[in-house]
Image (spheres, rainbow, N blue to C red):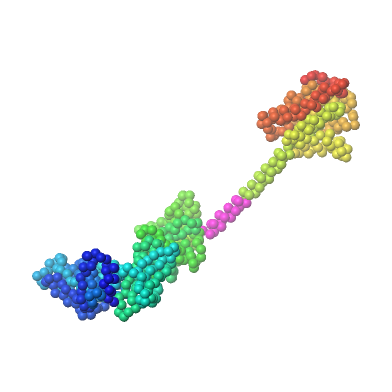
């Protein structure tokens, strides 16, 4: 359809160079040649069938260069079509006469014209240009992309080609609004026009996406994810024989290229064949890779396999013998990974923990094997510390016994997938056993620690045995027992158990207390006084009486029947300690049999005494000294009351050997 001149001026700009386009009058095509050449245009278009290259029988006239120029074909003074003039430069490679084909493509138009050219013998210079032939002209719409090819018929050499983008009319604008893209068509009101969206294809016909007849002006809204580089727009007036205007505004848009790869999909057709689905053509190459479970990158199987060029919607094949869920396809573009899919996982299940063995075959039937791992291909057998190296012997046995699945095979090598399930189950069984043993050991340790912590919290047991010389001494013994209870000690003394003693009997109670104390790792404390020494001597038949030692609450005599066997049999050390009070009894006054265990004088030797009571976990010296001072302060009032009573001297003093030594 002729376009008004003012619209052409808007599209072409106001540069004098552009506005001075040559105008051709009339609708007929024409051709003319360089001086000296003769040329003729066939009356009608021909089929665009370039055919195969054939050997030249001799010298030929062949195209060497294409050149285009925009001209105007005007039917009226102010109504013109944009037209593409093509100049074909020629050189003699063999013959003096040739049929030159010009092929023109601008969606949706495809045309081929045939030019006959003859060169006089005087102009023939082998390998050099002899002139050119010019064709007027191929009509094209504003904003369209035109592709031009030139070749001879028959075709002796590869065809020449040229692509050119024509200027577009300004009434089509593209604007963005958030996730939407607006196509703004500034067409006059009541102007009826057709609008089509299509995917332009480098090879094959365009793929229509959307078509509608509209009345201007219009705003067409698209989602930004629909934009791909090959999305083109075609607009034309709804009039007979109208010229269609094409524009592809997203060809260089980086977001459109990202959308293209997001829309691309790999489809598995058969075991060996697959294809790449995408709206537009893509420069890409593909290869197989091995995806192990665990999130490690997929490892390309190149070599032994190779990268293959990918054509959109064209079936491709890999020479596989068997499929495997861990086999994936990687698609790269410009050496960047764009797409990866494990095509066989849908039909064969999730990824398996298999090991891929790569067999390499060399001359003279030499073979080598390695196991593909994240760190590389580990040779088998190997002394490395990787999993495949540790299981290398078993993997080789599985391969030799036919338990591995062969995936690929040719003269250079083979690929084998070996299952690790039985080794994993064995490893997990050992791991579970180790965990159970560890849990049992840990429970035992915690139980022992708990028991030890309980024992430490309760303190060491101590059984305190003494002779009730008089009431003042009993008060002194009670003060000592109370002070020891403030430490981590559990003190048992008959002063606090008179009701139990009455119920069980003296001897039975002492036997039970001694046995329990020693079984718990405790200690028996013999607190010597003059009365106690006298009773011990009596038991040992020393002939010394113990005045007043047979009082109603005197239980020391009964306790001697429990402890004397341990001393006589040498079992007392470590289980018994002795003690006496300063100024009341000297340790040397204690019978020799009882001095086979340590005997401490109190309160002067309190730190050593407390250390012996709290073994085997005696506190640090500083802590021990603090506890000794604590016990000493607790004993001080009772000692003062006993040794400095108001009125008469305290009863029982001066009784027995060593009384009143003042030590």
Q: Quadrant of residue 491?
A: top right
Q: Is residue 542 left or right of residue 297?
A: right
Tell me where the magenta segment starts and ends, as one range.
419-436
Q: Is residue 596 above or below residue 395?
A: above
Front-most of 305 and 255?
Answer: 255
Residue drawn where x is 50% and y is 56% of the image: 294
Q: Is residue 151 left or right of residue 458?
A: left
Image quadrant in which you'd find residue 197: bottom left
x and y percentages locating residue 473 in the rendered image: 83, 27
Query: On screen, 577 above or below 647?
Result: below
Q: Camera-side residue: 329 or 628?
A: 628
Q: In the image, is residue 435 part of the stretch drawn in magenta?
A: yes
Residue 187 shows in the view: yes
Indicate whether residue 355 is drawn in magenta.
no
- Image quadrant holding the N terminus, namely bottom left
Rendered residue at 89%/29% (across/down): 550
The residue depicted at 24 percent of the width and 78 percent of the height is 45
Quadrant for the C terminus in the image? top right
| Outermost top residue | 661
Q: Which residue: 32% across, 74% down?
A: 244
**Majority secondary structure in the magenta region:** helix
Residue 606 picture location, percent across and down? 73, 27
């Amino acid at each position: 359809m002729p376009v008004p001149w003012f619209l052409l001026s808007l599209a072409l700009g106001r540069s004098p160079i552009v506005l001075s386009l040559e105008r051709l009058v009339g609708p007929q095509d024409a051709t003319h040649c360089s001086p000296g050449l003769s040329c003729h245009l066939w009356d009608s278009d021909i089929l665009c069938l370039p055919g195969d290259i054939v050997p030249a029988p001799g010298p030929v006239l062949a195209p060497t260069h294409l050149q285009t120029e925009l001209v105007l074909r005007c039917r009226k003074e102010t109504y013109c079509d944009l037209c593409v003039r093509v100049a074909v430069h020629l050189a003699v490679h063999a013959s003096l006469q040739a049929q030159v084909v010009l092929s023109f493509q601008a969606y949706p138009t495809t045309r081929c014209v045939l030019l006959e050219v003859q060169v006089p013998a005087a102009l023939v210079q082998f390998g050099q240009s002899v002139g050119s032939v010019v064709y007027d002209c191929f009509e094209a719409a504003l904003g369209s992309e035109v592709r031009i090819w030139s070749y001879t018929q028959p075709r002796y050499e590869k065809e020449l080609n040229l692509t050119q983008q024509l200027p577009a009319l300004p009434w089509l604008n593209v604007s963005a609004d958030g996730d939407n893209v607006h196509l703004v068509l500034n067409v006059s009101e009541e102007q009826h026009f057709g609008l089509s969206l299509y995917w332009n294809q480098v090879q094959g016909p365009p793929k229509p996406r959307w078509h509608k007849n509209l009345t201007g002006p219009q705003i067409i809204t698209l989602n930004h994810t629909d934009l791909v580089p090959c999305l083109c727009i075609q607009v034309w007036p709804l009039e007979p024989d109208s010229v269609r205007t094409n524009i592809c505004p997203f060809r260089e848009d980086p977001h459109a290229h990202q959308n293209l790869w997001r829309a691309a999909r790999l489809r598995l057709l058969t075991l060996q064949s697959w294809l790449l689905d995408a709206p537009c053509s893509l420069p890409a190459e593909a290869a197989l890779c091995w995806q192990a479970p665990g999130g490690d990158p997929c490892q390309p199987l190149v070599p032994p396999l190779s990268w293959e060029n990918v054509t959109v919607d064209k079936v491709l094949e890999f020479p596989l013998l068997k499929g495997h869920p861990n086999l994936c396809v990687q698609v790269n573009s410009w050496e960047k990974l764009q797409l990866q899919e494990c095509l066989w996982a849908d039909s064969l299940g999730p990824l398996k923990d298999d090991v891929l063995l790569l067999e390499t075959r060399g001359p003279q039937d030499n073979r080598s094997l390695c196991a593909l791992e994240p760190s590389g291909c580990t040779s088998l057998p190997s002394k490395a510390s990787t999993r495949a190296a540790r299981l290398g012997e078993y993997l080789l046995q599985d391969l030799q016994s036919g338990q591995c699945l062969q995936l690929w095979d040719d003269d250079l090598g083979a690929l084998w997938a070996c299952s690790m399930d039985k080794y994993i189950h064995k490893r997990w069984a050992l791991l579970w056993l180790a965990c159970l043993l560890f849990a049992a050991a840990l429970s035992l340790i915690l139980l022992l620690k708990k028991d030890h912590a309980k024992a430490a919290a309760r303190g060491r047991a101590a059984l305190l045995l003494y002779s009730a010389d008089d009431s003042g001494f009993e008060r002194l013994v009670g003060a000592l027992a109370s002070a020891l209870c403030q430490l981590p000690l559990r003190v048992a003394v008959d002063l606090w158990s008179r009701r139990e003693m009455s119920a069980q009997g003296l001897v039975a109670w002492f036997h039970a207390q001694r046995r329990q104390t020693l079984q718990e790792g405790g200690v028996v404390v013999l607190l010597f006084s003059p009365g106690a020494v006298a009773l011990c001597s009596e038991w040992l038949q020393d002939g010394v009486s113990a005045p007043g030692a047979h009082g109603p609450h005197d239980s020391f005599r009964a306790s001697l029947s429990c402890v004397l066997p341990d001393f006589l049999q040498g079992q007392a050390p470590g289980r018994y300690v002795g003690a006496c009070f300063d100024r009341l009894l000297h340790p040397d006054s204690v019978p020799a049999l009882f001095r086979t265990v340590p005997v401490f004088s109190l309160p002067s030797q309190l730190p050593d005494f407390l250390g012996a009571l709290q073994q085997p976990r005696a506190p640090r010296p500083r802590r021990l000294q603090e506890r000794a001072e604590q016990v000493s302060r607790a004993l001080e009032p009772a000692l003062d009351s006993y040794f400095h009573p108001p009125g008469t001297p305290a009863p029982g003093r001066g009784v027995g050997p060593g009384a009143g030594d003042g030590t």
